[in-house]
Amino acid sequence: MVAIQRILLVAFAAAVLAVTFHLIRKRRLREEYAVLWVVTGLVILVGALVPEGVLAWLSGALHLSYGVLITFVCFVFLAAIVLHYSVAISRHAEREKDLAQELALVRDELERLRAELREKQAPAPEKKPKPPALRT
Amino acid sequence: MTDADRDSALDDRDEPEDGFDDAGADLDLGGRRALVVVPAYNEAPAMERVLKDLARHAPWADVVVVDDGSTDATADEARRAGAKVLRLPVNLGIGGAVQTGYRYARRSGYDVAVQFDGDGQHRAACLAALVRPVLADEADLVIGSRFLEPRGHTATGSRLVGIRILSAVVSRIVGRRVTDPTSGFRAAGPRALALFAAEYPQDYPEPESLVLLHKQGLGFAERPATMRRRRDGTSSIGLWHGGWYMVKVLLAVVMDIFKAPVRLKEDA
């Protein structure tokens, strides 16, 4: 791997890590989701710094050229991230459903209590002469 | 006279051919409480008719309309007709709406919950026949089937083919004959009610819930029910025409076999 490739990869890894760090700091990315991006950045960094011999051995062992190997690693990481998101979306959909249902039930409870309260606060005309009895 | 003519003529009379005048109205619950859950999404024009039908044939049950985030006057129409209404703030789809009713039933201490569509296609006259086996503890869930004694409106064309394929697959999974796996006309007893309040399939709830029941060791039965052709609104499964829908339902039903069992907590 030529020096320029290594420099580019290190710069890319640094950018991924910096952006991730920045987003966490600004509270726009939760750590839960940041972990994958930090790991991705670190893997790119390791890939850029790994000695020539190890790379040659790895591509030889897998019968893949260096370019294909890198593409494959990238693909695996992107797939993992997308799968992670699908799982997260499913969980959020389930929570949203539970919350909506709870809201409908609580809204009904609120309406019922409100009606009850209204009845207590505005007694029927014939009951007006003795308000203290209503305090119970 | 075409099929469509015959069906619409059939709609306009009030169940005469079945001799159902006040059928079911005299059902004795034996001290137990029943709730009819009516899921409705933009069904304002049908509400009055549906609720009158229920009041006439099932005066022994309370009724709750679950308004699934409608954009029309469904909730107002239901309240005007005297029903209790639960309003979902967003549209959850039929599974989420029905489960809201099951959760309400469970919290309010009902013993039996009946699912009854808000579009007017189900006949309240058939309701008592579904509740009776539940009261007698013959089944945890009783499904009203259009195909046990085919009368009234069943299904046509590709929809019928789809139901046939699906019932063959579901029958094979649960190890017994299911003639109408997509019927949303069903009565649930206490055990099914507890299960559905905790966990109810959201994607294709009718066939999927049968696999869920089977996996949880609960029993279900079918009873004949006649249905009407819908008059207002559009079906929630308008995509029946298309193999893609079939593929997705079959995949969901087969996946249900492998899902981890539901553990019920005491407080659902």
Image (cartoon, coloured by chain):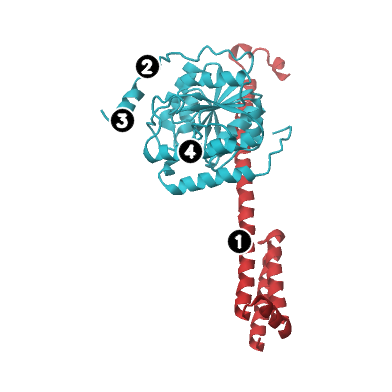
User: Going from the N terminus, do you reach mark 2 or mark 4 first?
Assistant: 2
State the SS at label 2. Answer: loop
Q: Which of A89 and B183 is in front in this view?
A: B183
Label 1 belongs to which residue?
A82
Q: Where is residue B26 in the image (x, y as percent from the top left)?
A: 52, 11
User: Going from the N terminus, do you reach mark 4 or mark 3 first?
Assistant: 3
Label pair 3/2, CB-CB below 8 angstroms: no
Label pair 2/1, CB-CB below 8 angstroms: no
Label 2 belongs to which residue?
B16
Alpha carbon separation for disc pair 1 and 4? 33 Å
Q: Where is residue B117 in the image (x, y as percent from the top left)?
A: 48, 30
Foreground: disc 3 or disc 2: 3
Is residue B111 depicted above or below B248 in this figure? above
What tint does the image give chain B?
cyan
Which quadrant would residue B43 be assigned to in this image? top left
The chain that hosts pointer 2 is B
State the SS at label 1. Answer: helix
Q: Position of residue B205 (x, y in %)?
A: 55, 38
State the SS at label 4. Answer: loop
